[in-house]
Image (cartoon, grey):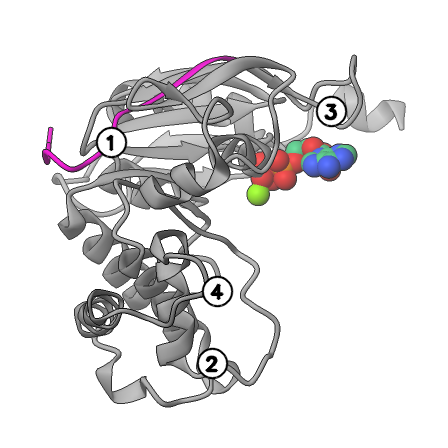
Amino acid sequence: MSCKSDAAALEVRDLAWGPDRGRPIISEVALAAAAGERIAIVGPNGAGKTTLLRCLYRAYRPDRGRVLVDGEDVWAVPARRVAQKMAVVLQEAPADFPFRVRDIVLLGRIPHRQGLASWSERDRRLAAHALEHLELQGMADRVFASLSGGEKQRVLVARALAQDPRIIVLDEPTNHLDIRHQLEILQLLKALRITIVTTLHDIDLAADFADRVALMAGGRVVAFGPPDQVLTAERISEVFAVRARRDPSRDGSGARFFFSIPARPVQAEAAE
Ligand code: ADP
Ligand code: MG
């Protein structure tokens, strides 16, 4: 397990949230990340992954349960304090405002800014460092809207880095990226060695990336633990309603499973 002294520990206890009371979308959610640990949340569309993340980064106030960052309830402290520790990379890219890459990355410094003061030397230095880290120096003056999907994603991660967070929460950071860029972004996140909670669609990428995986279905965490314990063929088959078969020739890297749609029972077809 990687561990860095300025990474934050995260704990989620018995969490529930719904748009109306009595109609929970997630419930009984519990998980924990030690400082520097990477957690991947996987599960089918509609399982409640994004909703859980929204509770983590203090967008949704839970109906039940708590989210603790370094033992501190995120709702017991001001939003700004949470933002100073936690950066968020969402699927929705900022609208096509004519912002330049450099300015978007500087926005990561907002939680640390004193009032309406202009950017400090430190703000500019951290933003420049983040640009460099994501190999975006050459694009600093480009307009965000003109970038490719992969480049945009890197800018959003750079903005999160400029925030100098103790924990990063990401929603499907590999969406719309080709496989090379998917691997690159995950490798880069891994190298940060801070606490990371991310949703991921790809089972193999999740297993390779995370120290622990939370498998969600129907608004609950059905399994949480080391990837190879959680991501069994049986569980995946059940949760995703597919036929998952382990690749017997796998030699420690590459895809773990073959997936197919199970043949429907003959009786069920006849009944339609
Ligand atoms: P996932 O990210 O796993 O695909 P979501 O967390 O986005 O799933 O959504 C889980 C379910 O909750 C979906 O059926 C979605 O339509 C519903 N949902 C999410 N947010 C709201 C909301 N604010 N109001 C009503 N339903 C919601
Ligand atoms: Mg989602």
Q: Nearer the viewer, mark 1 or mark 4?
A: 1
| Quadrant occupied by the C terminus | top right
Instruction: Check the image and report above or below for 38 versus 9.
Output: below
Q: Nearer the viewer, residue 165 or 25?
A: 165
* Residue 231 coordinates in the image, percent (x, y): 35, 25
For numbered disc 2, what is the local secondary structure?
helix
The residue pinned by badge 2 equals 144
Whole-angstrom CA distance, mark 2 to mark 3, is 53 Å
Q: Quadrant of residue 3?
A: top left
Discs 1, 3 touching: Cβ within 8 Å: no
Numbered tag placed on residue 176 in the rendering = 4
Amino acid beneath label 3: Val
Q: Which of disc 3 and disc 4 is earlier in sequence?
A: 4
Q: Quadrant of residue 234?
A: top left
Q: Secondary structure at mark 4?
A: loop
Q: Mark 2 is on which residue type?
A: Phe
Q: Which residues are magenta?
A: 1-14
- Vertical order, 104 against 42 (above or below): below
Residue at image location 28% in from the left, 36% down from the top: 207
Amino acid at circle 1: Ala
Which one is earlier in the sequence, the residue at label 1 or at label 3?
1
Q: Nearer the viewer, residue 256 or 7?
A: 7
Residue 266: which disc?
3
Q: Main secondary structure of the magenta part?
A: loop
The amino acid beneath tag 4 is His
Q: Badge 1 is on which residue? A: 8
Q: Secondary structure at mark 1?
A: loop
Whole-percent x and y of residue 47?
60, 30
Q: Is 139 located above or below residue 158 in the figure?
A: below
Q: Dot 1, crowdedness within 10 Å: few (<14), some or many (≥20)?
A: many
Q: Position of residue 143 (x, y in %)?
A: 46, 87
